[in-house]
């Protein structure tokens, strides 16, 4: 099994899984069959499945239930780890409530803020904590993924705090480039750039 | 001037502009000089500037103030158009309050929702309207860019409404693929996939 998978392939795995579950009574299934059902290119499907689960048998394909559990394992092994958000502003709260993450086995387990009023406004049952509890929480829950949703001026400080607590993947919405050790996977999510680029593609 | 520009190039233009404004008293400036100052690759800077503003003069480079106005025009011409959001949930409100868009000359001018309670909770001075006013607003303000921040079940309906109102660029946060005419620039922003992919890159 490959250790890395392209973002495009990863993005299609939930779609394969959703489809395969509708035909799970079929004993075997081929890449060709799946490609037709989903209107995907056959070569693409073949590549995706082989990257995640190895090649199917010639003329037979995959045993459907094995393929389902392989793809499930693949997504889970790769992504199953609790994540935390720092910053309980509008964006932090929106991300905290975003349902799509579970599709990839990602669980956002807590939200931190330094504003005690924000923290106390939301009941503790919602797992919103004061940032002073961050270190202990990460240690106890073996947190490996951190999401930064604080203003630009706070972002590097929060990032350093995450690195210090052994977080190995940092996803930042702050509109600056953060300094992150090479051993940490880091992505700046630049929403403004995404929209700006889309806007340049329109034909008015 | 090229009509299309890569997302990567577009993303660097605000950085060039920020830097150039700090040295605007310098009469001329070369790509090499800019590359060093920003720790960018020289080839990259040369390519970016030439895509947006043509080539500099050999051994001289660009006239600094001309380069600034050219890059500003470039970003503005490409992106200067009012955008609207449909869906005033947490994500819609977060996007509405996001400050980074102005960096690219994008202005979010209004937010629509069908929930009259949400609409009335926020004062009309904030430009939050009932969705029944969408058609007229788009017509009066020549809206070309629409952002979808409604739940999955509503997204296609909202998308169709945008297309009907001559919106030519649609940016959707709903976790489904929408059907959009080929003449409309469309991007599904899949936040869950972005985080999932980042998560796969970590080395624990």
Image (tube, coloured by chain):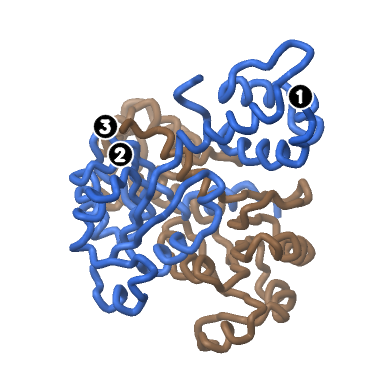
Chain colours: A brown, B blue
Say whether disc 1 or disc 2 marks the residue closer to the N-terminus: 1
Res B28 label? 1
| Mark 3 secondary-structure assignment | loop
Q: Image point 47% across, 42% down: which residue?
A: A196
The answer to whether the residue labelled 3 contacts the one labelled 2, judged by CB atoms less than 8 Å apart, is no
State which mark lies toward you, 1 or 2. 1
Q: Image point 79% across, 12% down: which residue?
A: B59
- Evaluate whether residue A33 shows in this view: no
Chain letter for mark 1, please.
B
State which mark lies toward you, 1 or 3. 1
Q: Image point 76% across, 24% down: which residue?
A: B28
Q: Quadrant of the C terminus of chain A?
A: top left
Vertical position of residue B90 compared to residue B25: above or below: below
Q: Image point 20% across, 48% down: which residue?
A: B160
Residues A125 and B91: in front is B91
Say whether disc 1 or disc 3 marks the residue closer to the N-terminus: 1
What distance separates the C-alpha of mark 1 from that of mark 3?
Answer: 43 Å
x and y percentages locating residue A64 in the rendered image: 33, 45
Residues A49 and B9: in front is B9
The residue identified by callout 3 is: B182
**Picture quadrant of residue A154:** bottom right
The residue identified by callout 2 is: B168
Q: Quadrant of the N terminus of chain A?
A: top right
Say whether disc 3 or disc 2 marks the residue closer to the N-terminus: 2
């Amino acid at each position: 099994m490959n250790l890395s998978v392209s973002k495009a392939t990863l993005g299609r795995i939930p779609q394969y899984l959703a489809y395969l579950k509708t035909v799970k009574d079929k004993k075997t299934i081929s890449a060709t069959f799946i490609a037709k059902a989903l209107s995907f290119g056959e070569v693409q499907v073949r590549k995706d499945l082989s990257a995640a689960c190895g090649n199917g048998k010639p003329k037979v394909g995959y045993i459907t239930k094995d393929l389902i559990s392989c793809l499930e394992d693949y997504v889970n092994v790769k992504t199953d780890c609790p994540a935390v958000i720092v910053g309980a502003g509008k964006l932090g709260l929106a991300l905290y409530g975003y349902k799509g993450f579970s599709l990839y086995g990602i669980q956002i387990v807590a939200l931190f803020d330094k504003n005690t009023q924000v923290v106390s406004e939301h009941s503790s049952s919602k797992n919103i904590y004061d940032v002073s509890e961050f270190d202990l929480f990460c240690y106890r829950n073996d947190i490996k993924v951190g999401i930064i949703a604080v203003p630009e001026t706070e972002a590097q400080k929060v990032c350093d705090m995450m690195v210090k607590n052994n977080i190995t993947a940092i996803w930042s919405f702050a509109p600056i480039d953060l300094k992150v050790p090479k051993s940490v996977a880091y992505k700046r999510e630049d929403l403004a750039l995404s929209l700006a680029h889309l806007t340049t593609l329109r034909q008015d």
